[in-house]
Image: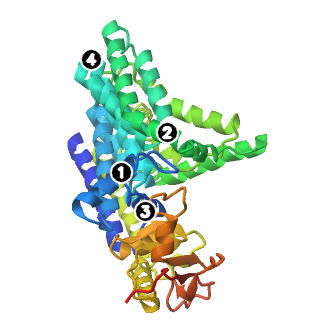
Amino acid sequence: MPPWQAVLVSAAVVVLWALWAAHFNTAQFGDNIEQFNWAQSLELGYHKHPPLPSLALGLVIKLFGPSVYWAYTLATLCLLGTLGFTWLIGRELIGNRLSAAAIVLWGLNLSFSQRVQLYNHNTVLVLCIAATVWFAMRASRGKTLWWVATGVGAGAAMLSKYQALVPLAGLLLALVLTGRLKRPAQWAGFALALVVMLAVFAPHAEWVAQNDFTTLRYAADAVESANLWMRVRFVIAFVANQIRLAFPALLAIAICWVWMRSCRRGVVVASEASVAPDFNRWTLGLVWVTLLVLLAMALVGGVSLRNHWGVQALQFFPLWLVWVWERRIAIDLRKLVCVALAVQALSLTLYAVEHRDPHAVLSSRRVDTAYPARRLARAAVAHWASATNCPLRYVEGTVFDAGLVSLYSGGKIQVFDSDRATPWVRAEDLQRDGALFVLDERDAVPAGVTNLKVFDLVLGNKLGRPGKAVTLGVRLPAQPCT
């Protein structure tokens, strides 16, 4: 099978997963809803993260109008771009065939298959890092414009998530170790890229200083007072979750290994002509540095590692994985693609079965994508209309549920989270126009909220499990409307 066909199949599977999710989902991931909530105002920063993902979504909404499918679209475009840049990087480091094999394994990771619909800061970060690495590879050959592109990519990565500092430092290490920053002209180009990166990041840095360093304080929340055993547990839990996300890829490797061994192809060492002689130095910078930093953060700093940090930290890991595999037995690309498609088909089927179950929302884990978003939005808007003739402009309460009501009722209702999270919604506006409340059943009812109504998330619960519900309420406008 030609390598480009394997890459094209992997790209098609990414698109298929997005369409599959859009068909079977009745809601969206909480991170998607958070992005929609923030995108209601174009800001230079938001209380948790830098602005780029929310700004991109907000600009799309401004240009083309609101739609529940914009998060799916942007997430898919980001991952297709990441796939393309990773393929280009792999071609330079391990050759066309192994790079194509790496892309097939990359697409089997649950972060890039089942969760391809997830649009958050990691989604944009992996694209920006992949682009920056590729631009830097090109720039180190002496083209000034590529250094400018490297600076823009690095700045965009920092505007996606501060975690970008780690892979960018790893990239710098890789450039030094591979001798791509030997000549004065190369160092001058690197300095130019650094200046461009700082210029791109500067407006957000000023916003952070003016807003009491809110994003840095949020990042610091991951640091905990933990003894040595707890810190080891952080690492074990993180590794276990990364193995869970990579399980489809590991399963495909195991099946291919048995299949190829049964064909008695024997052990074949990777061709020196296809693998770059400095490949190990590149993987040190692109893979191992990021993982070592996470390990040090947990064991030395007492940081509770978040599962989603592995999305970027391991984004180039398939390049190393296929290199190791090829050194032991030759990878048959056609067999790998066939096995990968079979594993993807199984995963698609399981996803459809779960989301066809009307009781999926009763699972012990919160299945965001199974919430009855449209039914909740209709019921909430109707409840407001039954209490007042005034137009509904604001919704608040449980942020995920309030965001669902806003998005699935047309995207025009402003979501209020808190003064820190959504400062563009002012207290006097809420007082004047009132607000619809969507509360978790365990939440206390805020003062002034009346007309309470329980909304069951599952109709006709026949499984004997405890039900789940939210409470709808109204805080009436200051003046009645006629």
Instruction: Tell which of 143 and 385 is nearer to you.
Output: 385
Q: Please, what secondary structure does the residue beneath circle 4 have?
A: loop
Q: Please, what secondary structure does the residue beneath circle 1 have?
A: helix
The crowding category of the residue bearing disc 1, from other C-alpha atoms within 10 Å (few below 14, some 14 to 19, many at least 20), is: many
For the residues bearing labels 4 and 1, Cβ distance under 8 angstroms: no
> What is the C-alpha distance between the residues marked 1 and 2?
16 Å
Q: Position of residue 195 (x, y in %)?
A: 37, 23
Res. 401 visible in picture:
no
- Residue type at mark 3: give it: Asn
Q: Residue at x 54, y 59 (%)?
A: 419
Sequence order check, earlier mark of 2 and 3:
3
Q: Nearer the viewer, mark 4 or mark 2?
A: 2
- Residue type at mark 2: give it: Tyr
For the residues bearing labels 1 and 2, Cβ distance under 8 angstroms: no
Q: Which mark is residue 37?
A: 3
> What is the C-alpha distance between the residues marked 1 and 3?
11 Å
Q: Which residue is mark 2?
A: 162
Q: Please, what secondary structure does the residue beneath circle 3 have?
A: helix
Q: Position of residue 333 (x, y in %)?
A: 30, 43
Q: Residue at x 32, y 36 (%)?
A: 131
Color style of the picture? rainbow
- Residue type at mark 4: give it: Arg
Determine which quarter of the picture holds residue 292. top right
Q: Position of residue 294 (x, y in %)?
A: 59, 37
The crowding category of the residue bearing disc 3, from other C-alpha atoms within 10 Å (few below 14, some 14 to 19, many at least 20), is: many
The crowding category of the residue bearing disc 2, from other C-alpha atoms within 10 Å (few below 14, some 14 to 19, many at least 20), is: some
Q: Which residue is mark 1?
A: 55
